[in-house]
């Protein structure tokens, strides 16, 4: 199993979850009540699954594609370590991954 820690935007709430290698970070987040909308269902046509990867973990991820970078340019509150969670598949090397949910995230599908 691969442990992932989701931090709230203010860092006050921490949710540790486990997924299997090959699981997608967006689907894992949604299955565990995280406020990531993922409107386009992982097709990279939106930025509603934007997360901020902890700096210690950012360089362990495969580089973002040009298409992902283009979508991140549209993400509210994007930072240097921002990624689209739909583009992160878990591997054993990511055991312990820490991501923060941006303050700008709103899951309108849960309303």
Image (cartoon, rainbow, N blue to C red):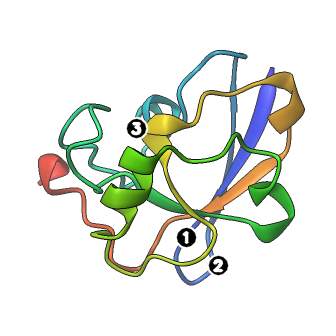
Q: List x then y, in percent, for residue 93.
A: 88, 31
The image quarter containing residue 89 is top right
Identify the disc placed on residue 110: none
- Choose the circle earlier in sequence order: 2 or 3: 2
Q: List x then y, in percent, for residue 32.
A: 49, 38
Q: CA distance from mark 2 to mark 3?
A: 19 Å
Q: CA distance from mark 2 to mark 1?
A: 5 Å
Mark 1 — residue? Answer: 8
Q: Residue at x 77, y 24 (%)?
A: 91
Mark 3 — residue? Answer: 30
- Quarter in which the N terminus is drawn: top right
Say if 94 sits above or below 106 in the image: above
Q: Are marks 2 and 1 in contact (CB under 8 Å)?
A: yes
75, 73: nearer the viewer? 73
Say if 97 sits above or below 24 in the image: below
- Element carrying mark 2: loop
Q: Residue at x 22, y 51 (%)?
A: 46
Please rate how many residues cluster around mark 2, counting C-alpha atoms within 10 Å: few if below 14, some from 14 to 19, many from 20.
few
- Residue 32 seen from this side: no
Q: Residue at x 25, y 31 (%)?
A: 41
Q: CA distance from mark 1 to mark 3?
A: 14 Å
Q: Residue at x 43, y 37 (%)?
A: 86
Mark 2 — residue? Answer: 11
Q: List x then y, in percent, for residue 50.
A: 42, 58
- Quarter in which the C terminus is drawn: bottom left
In this rendering, position of residue 84 left or right of residue 22:
left
Please rate how many residues cluster around mark 3, counting C-alpha atoms within 10 Å: few if below 14, some from 14 to 19, many from 20.
some
């Amino acid at each position: 199993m691969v442990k992932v820690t989701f931090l709230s935007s203010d860092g006050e709430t921490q949710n540790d979850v486990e997924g299997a290698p090959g699981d997608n970070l967006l689907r894992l987040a949604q299955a565990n009540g995280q406020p990531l909308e993922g409107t386009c269902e992982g097709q990279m046509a939106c930025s509603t699954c934007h997360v901020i990867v902890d700096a210690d973990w950012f360089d362990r991820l495969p580089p973002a594609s040009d298409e992902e970078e283009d979508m991140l340019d549209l993400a509210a509150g994007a930072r240097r370590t921002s990624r689209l969670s739909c583009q992160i598949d878990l591997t054993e090397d990511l055991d312990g991954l820490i991501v923060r949910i941006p303050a700008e995230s709103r899951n309108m599908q849960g309303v």
